[in-house]
Image (tube, rainbow, N blue to C red):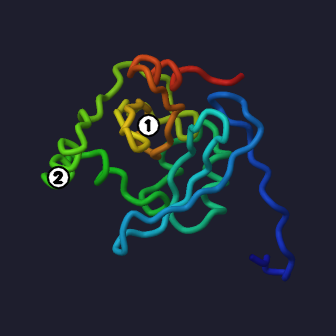
Amino acid sequence: MKTKKGRTPPPVKLLVCPFCGYSAGHLSKWKDSDDEPTVYVIDCESCNASGPVMGGNGARAKAAWNLRGGPPATLTAEHRGTPESVYGDETEEEREKREVEGRKPATRLEDPSPCPFCAGREVYVEEGFSGKKKEPYYYTFCGTCEACGPAHDTSEGFATLGWNKRFP
């Protein structure tokens, strides 16, 4: 990407992970299906937390990772996709898939620490499964910007503690 004067801007230096303090993250991109847009996110290589999910390009994901405690309005639906459709009212198809996978519905936390990225307070804990044996794990996520806290394989309580813990 070139600036208006034809210069290449310097690379964005990523801030440390707000949950564990690890010094760097890596950029991931994914696309759930052909009719979904590609999204980008910065993942922590130490605790597996992730920053806000962003559409557009990797530069937006890096900027969102570096945004600490900004107002939720700075991460608009245009920038991140539409998490309301993911975490709002569950469709019949989503409910059936979740039940087939044996997952419980996401639970909204009563008094969470605000999201370290957007300061949102709509935070949920959810169960996921990984590996061939479908081992359960629990993770927290922000319903505003879709950032995820560290995952824990023991309980929803430890996932909640991981979300509420912040690196100074």
Vertical comparison of 72 with 79: above or below: above
Q: Is residue 64 left or right of residue 115?
A: right
- SS category of the residue bearing label 1: strand
Q: Earlier in the sequence, mark 2 or mark 1?
A: 2
The residue singled out by tag 1 in the image is 141
Q: Mark 2 sits on what residue? A: 91
- For the C terminus, the image quarter is top right
Instruction: Pick whichever, 154 or 64, lies toward us.
Output: 154
Numbered badge on residue 119: none
Where is residue 32, by image quadrant? bottom left
Name the residue nearer the viewer: 59 or 98.
Answer: 98
Residue 125 pos. (x, y %): 37, 30
Tag 2 near tag 1, CB within 8 Å: no
Q: Which residue appears at 49% of the width and 62% of the height?
A: 30
**Which residue corresponds to the image point at 58% horizontal and 33% vertical from the top-left?**
116
Three-letter code, disc 1: Phe
Secondary-structure class at tag 2: loop
Q: Position of residue 145 (x, y in %)?
A: 47, 46
> Residue type at mark 2?
Thr
Picture quadrant of residue 11: bottom right
Picture coordinates of residue 3 (x, y %)? 79, 76
